[in-house]
Image (tube, rainbow, N blue to C red):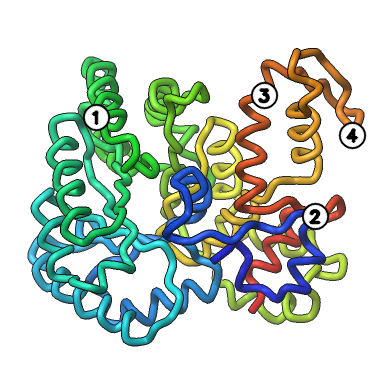
Amino acid sequence: MRHFGHIAPAARERLFFQEPCEFGPGSSARVLAAALGATLYSPATRPRLADDVIKQAGRGVVSMVLCLEDSIDDSEVADAEENLVRQFADLDAQGAEVPLLFIRVREPGQIADLVQRLGSTARMLSGFVLPKFTEERGVPFMEALTSAEKTCGRRLFAMPVLESPELLHLETRGETLQGIARTVDKYRERVLALRLGVTDFCSAYGLRRAPDMTAYDVQIVGAVIADVVNVLGRADGTGFTITGPVWEYFRLQERMFKPQLRRSPFLEGRAEELRTALIEHDLDGLLREIELDRANGLLGKTCIHPSHVAPVHALSVVSHEEFSDAEDILRPERGGGGVMRSAYTNKMNEVKPHRAWAERTLLRAEVFGVARQDIGFVELLAAGLAE
């Protein structure tokens, strides 16, 4: 699979200076963590879940979480587990290419049980999402994952969700963060990414952000994100990929844009028309939050509606200017440091301070591609939405 792999090769060639790379479940953890993109969540109770997975893969989704936790009622868990086993068998029978699939469990015991019940179809499973992760809760989860790997004979990744009240509350945050750091470091080779449960953070104080506000506008939430990145997202080799929080609003109806998108993959000058429509349909907040995610060291995003996928992926593509700066900074002859004017002649590139940024940018360029010089977000979004 690859990002923007669902659009025609000729369209990709017109959009990209450097096309996104191909990757799959067997790729390195480094590549997979960066490539997660918009991770689409779906309740495990959906009766046609296998068909939904295949449909979303055909629309550009590369990672999905099938949820047995907060998205379903407590009374539905047993039926949802049975449904997952049936749906994996259905996916196997159809033989279609699927995204990276993760199951969000409630308790450690579910991991071994599900792997055993899935049998040979567990080969389509990339790992598990572990809720309300702390050191106390996380160690049993990670031990269960390690045991399940031996059972199914293949690599399984963990994506812990950082959402517990102990992490939010100021008096316990530091100790909780240190405990999480010890746990994920111990199982580093199995931790693909850390996910933020901002909805749970807001819940602890009876808060809910409006569609014109980002998670960073809710100061108590923004403070937690900053502390998580401070401890767990460092660029010195000790950090992990941390993904952006969920966006709860989804009034945008993609079908409204289909007729105009079909007329031209590049909108023929109607970029402002689409941009205005996005703002009017409550996606302006989402777009600002995606930009703030990256500015604050996060990559990828939890999504609960398919309409969020294309904006996340379009804004993840590296611009030609970013790519040019990153390559200049990382040239071998710059190894000793120094300062230079950018190739776009609009900024200073300082080799040593900007090196970590440049390395991260080139990794993102590898998995999401580099846009051509005259291609911007709207053209990439239009291509991602067009069928």
Q: Secondary structure at mark 3?
A: helix
Q: Position of residue 318 (x, y in %)?
A: 70, 46
Q: Residues within 10 Å of mark 2 (few under 14, many from 20)?
A: some
- Residue beneath label 4, please? 344
Q: Secondary structure at mark 4?
A: loop
Q: Amino acid at mark 1?
A: Thr
Report the mark closest to the observer, 3 or 4.
3
Q: Nearer the viewer, residue 178 or 359?
A: 359
CA gap between label 2 and label 3 equals 22 Å
Q: Which mark is residue 43?
A: none
**Left or right: residue 340 compared with residue 223:** right
Decide which of tag 2 and tag 3 comes sooner along the chain. 2
**Dot 3 corresponds to which residue?**
355
Q: Quadrant of residue 6?
A: bottom right
Which amino acid is tagged 4? Tyr
Residue type at mark 3 is Arg
Q: Which mark is residue 183?
A: 1
Judging depth in this view, the residue of 112 and 220 nearest the camera is 112
**Mark nearer the N terminus (4 vs 2):** 2
* Label 4 crowd bin: few (<14), some (14–19), many (20+), radius 10 Å: few
Dot placed on the residue nearer the N-terminal end, 4 or 1: 1
Q: Which quadrant of the rendered structure holds the N terminus? A: bottom right
Mark 3 and mark 4 lie on one chain; the one further toward the N terminus is 4
Residue drawn 87% across the image and 65% down it: 269
| Nearer the camera: disc 4 or disc 2 | 2
How far is disc 3 from disc 4 in space, using C-alphas? 18 Å
Residue assigned mark 2:
17
